Image (spheres, rainbow, N blue to C red):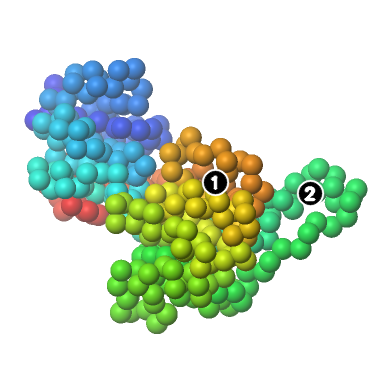
């Protein structure tokens, strides 16, 4: 069922770029939920005409939200992670779900590598050392650790994990990975559990999917195995790491440093991170380039238009 304009209703849960909203408006009547003062009342007012939902990976789509939309047919996610979308509820109602894989892989891997270099070489501290005048007043800053030639463990060897592994080759690193199953087409050491992987790594990069299956996967045992000289980078989901254990390790010397793009309770993250000099923080921005965000927006639109026109979905999840 379409609205009076003849267009299907699209409920967008969180901000999209204005140019992307304008492009979507050519095919849909776009309703901006994030601008509503009373979101439940807003949803009730538009619910009968909503055939599609546009969301973001960190926002998702709950069963409660989908239950308020009786005509809902598709949820299109701007992002790869669908852990915040209730896929079981969507499947039970025949609601299609799509995401935006591949187009963000290389940018996310780039930022992961940037965080690794920044944490190991203490790039933010070096910048501050120069800007503050400390270099001229007190001389060189303390020595850092190299990245080249070290042992890198990758938790989750999906698209992004593989892109990270390719970059590691250029740094002459020994690479191993952990995951539920061994990748048949990858000639790298594999561990079913991240603890032995961490024990044999100098640096650990988390690239696995989020969700209940990986919640707290990297906890105290993994951090202890990585050890006081270890560096942790997380470009996956904040839920994968036990943050209390991570903060304790960073405070007490149980871990040398960390580079983090994702957190629990983001954007209102634990302020304890702000007090630590051995952690580099980013605002969940690994895919945040002009080029990738444009490609992600285009893929969201392609999935939505394909659905309402009866064409095959480019990137279906469910």
Q: Position of residue 285 (x, y in %)?
A: 49, 46
Q: Quadrant of residue 95?
A: top left
Q: In the drawing, does residue 260 fall left or right of residue 14?
A: right
Q: Quadrant of residue 143?
A: bottom right
Asked if labels 2 and 1 touch by Cβ distance under 8 angstroms, the answer is no
Residue 186 is labelled as: none
Name the residue that disc number 1 marks: 282
Task: Measure the C-alpha gap from mark 1 to mark 2.
Answer: 20 Å
Mark 2 secondary-structure assignment: helix
Q: Position of residue 51 (x, y in %)?
A: 16, 34
Crowding near pointer 1: few (<14 within 10 Å), some, many (20+)?
A: some
Mark 1 secondary-structure assignment: loop
Q: Earlier in the sequence, mark 1 or mark 2?
A: 2
**Which quarter of the rendering shows the N terminus?**
top left
Q: Residue furthest right?
A: 137
Taking the spot 51% from the left edge, 68% from the top edge, the residue there is 225
Is 115 located above or below residue 57 in the figure?
below
Q: Position of residue 307 (x, y in %)?
A: 16, 45
Viewer-proximal residue among 193 and 211: 193
Taking the spot 19% from the left edge, 37% from the top edge, the residue there is 63
Name the residue that disc number 2 marks: 129
């Amino acid at each position: 069922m379409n609205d009076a304009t003849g267009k299907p209703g699209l409920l967008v849960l969180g901000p999209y770029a204005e140019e992307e909203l304008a492009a979507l408006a050519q095919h849909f009547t776009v309703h901006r939920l994030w601008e509503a003062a009373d979101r439940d009342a807003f949803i009730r007012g538009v619910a009968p005409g909503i055939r599609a939902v546009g969301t973001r990976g960190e926002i998702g789509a709950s069963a409660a939200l989908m239950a308020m939309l009786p005509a809902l047919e598709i949820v299109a996610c701007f992002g790869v992670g669908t852990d915040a979308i209730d896929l079981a509820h969507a499947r039970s109602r025949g609601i299609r779900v799509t995401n935006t894989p591949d187009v963000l892989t290389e940018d996310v891997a780039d930022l992961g590598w940037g965080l690794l270099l920044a944490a190991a070489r203490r790039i933010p501290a070096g910048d501050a050392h120069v800007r503050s005048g400390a270099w001229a007043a007190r001389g060189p800053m303390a020595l850092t650790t190299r990245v080249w030639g070290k042992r890198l463990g990758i938790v989750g060897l999906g698209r992004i994990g593989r892109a990270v592994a390719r970059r590691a080759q250029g740094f002459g690193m020994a690479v191993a990975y952990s995951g539920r199953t061994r990748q048949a087409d990858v000639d790298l050491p594999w561990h079913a559990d991240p603890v032995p992987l961490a024990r044999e790594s100098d640096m650990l990069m988390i690239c696995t999917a989020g969700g209940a299956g990986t919640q707290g996967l990297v906890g105290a045992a993994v951090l202890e195995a990585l050890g006081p000289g270890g560096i942790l980078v997380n470009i996956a989901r904040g839920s994968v790491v036990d943050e209390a254990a991570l903060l304790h390790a960073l405070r007490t010397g149980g871990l040398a440093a960390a580079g983090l793009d994702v957190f629990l309770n983001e954007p209102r993250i634990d302020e304890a991170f702000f007090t630590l000099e051995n952690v580099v923080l980013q605002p969940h921005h690994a895919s945040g380039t002009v080029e990738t965000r444009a490609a992600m927006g285009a893929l969201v639109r392609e999935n939505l238009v394909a659905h309402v026109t009866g064409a095959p979905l480019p990137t279906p999840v469910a």
